[in-house]
Amino acid sequence: MPRRLTVVQLLPALESGGVERSTLEIAAALVAAGHRSVVVSAGGRLVAALLAAGSEHVELDIGRKSPWVLRQVPALRRVLTRLNADIVHARSRLPAWIGHLALRDARLRARFVTTVHGLNSPSRYSRIMARGERVICVSETVRAHVRAHYPDTDPARIEVIPRGIDPAAFPRDHAPPAGWRAALEATHPELAGGRLLLMPGRGTRLKGHGDAIAVLAALRAGGIDARLWLMGAGGTGREGYLEELRALARGAGVDGQLAIGPPRDDIVDAYAASDLVLQLSRKPEAFGRTVVEALAVGRPVLGWAHGGVGELLAALYPTGAAALGDMDALAARARALLEDAPAPPVTIPYSLAAMQAATLALYVRLADA
């Protein structure tokens, strides 16, 4: 049986987001396997969940973008010494620098792991994420990014461990509870009737909301009664951008079939109620979790064939990929999927359990090396 390890994960804070979710998922797996799990961050609303699952938290502001953050190097060094850490796993650039500097103390025997969660602009600052003794990439797209921009990184140190989902949280052929659709249409009457297009994602231009509106207009012009729900695009601080989207919809004559709403917790119900899920980020995604979640529920997905989204669609649902920027092809593909969509694969290989097992196996191999 592998020896008990002390694994310390470093990140700026524990508020929300994919990096934070992955941190908690690995922390839970460590505890379940009998290891000691510690997270160092500035804190946040997810700390309670971390502690409840059996991990420990050390509050250090290692993600503040200020010269003063270097004062945290000796503080983190003391923490790692006290814990007798075996693995230090950095998930963000500034915490990675602080961890790297702290581990310069020869008395510390911890091994240094980094995870490249995103396609950050290449720079000396970002290079730290390729300097782990093991560099985890969340997709082949990310591995290619690292290899292209940091060619001096030993390929043997890079390991692709895709992010994963819990199949139990996104069950095949899930049905929303009774009254769910009626409640949705009461909140968003624009979605009543017709074929529902769902596009989950934050309200930023890079997410491709304008392309989704263009698809909606093309479908309706072709006689399909489509409706579009931009779930997650709404929220405070985004009013200017949302007005741009509404103006775009008015200009296309589809403002009466467009609903823009805030993030919601019932995403699995939204997937299940949808006829087509869109993932149209103009900026390449590192992974594309939306694709995996929707396909797991059994819903067709349409996205641009680039980045992590293109990688996932090529592997799992190639009929849902359109060449980036080809709006005619995108609209034609949307129509085809609404008329006769191939069933998504029954088994989705990108599981949470697989991601957890591969990460813990990497820790053990490195600690024993």
Image (cartoon, rainbow, N blue to C red):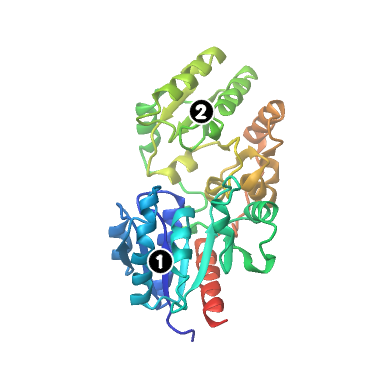
In which quadrant of the rendered view does residue 136 lie?
A: bottom right
Amino acid carrying label 2: it is Leu
- Residue 162 appears anywhere in the view: no
Q: Residue at x 47, y 61 (%)?
A: 90
Mark 2 vs mark 1, foreground winner is: 1
- In this rendering, the answer to whether 117 lies above or below 246 is below
Q: Is 169 located above or below residue 335 in the figure? A: below
**Kind of residue at disc 1:** Ala
* Residue under numbered circle 1: 27
Tell me where residue 302 appears, x and y as whole percent. 62, 38
Residue 151 at x, y = what percent?
A: 70, 57
User: Mark 2 = which residue?
Assistant: 228
Q: In front here: 73 or 126?
A: 73
Note whether 96 is above or below 324 in the view shown: below
Report the residue that reaches farthest toward the bottom: 1
The percent position of residue 215, horizontal first and vertical second, equals: 61, 26
Label 1 crowding class (10 Å Cα cut-off): few <14, some 14-19, many 20+?
Answer: many
- Label 1 sits on a secondary structure element that is helix
Query: Residue at image x 33%, y 68%?
Result: 55
Task: Indicate the secondary structure of the residue bearing disc 2.
Answer: strand
Residue 305 is marked as: none
Q: Is residue 241 left or right of residue 354?
A: left
Between 99 and 223, which is closer to the camera in this rendering? 99
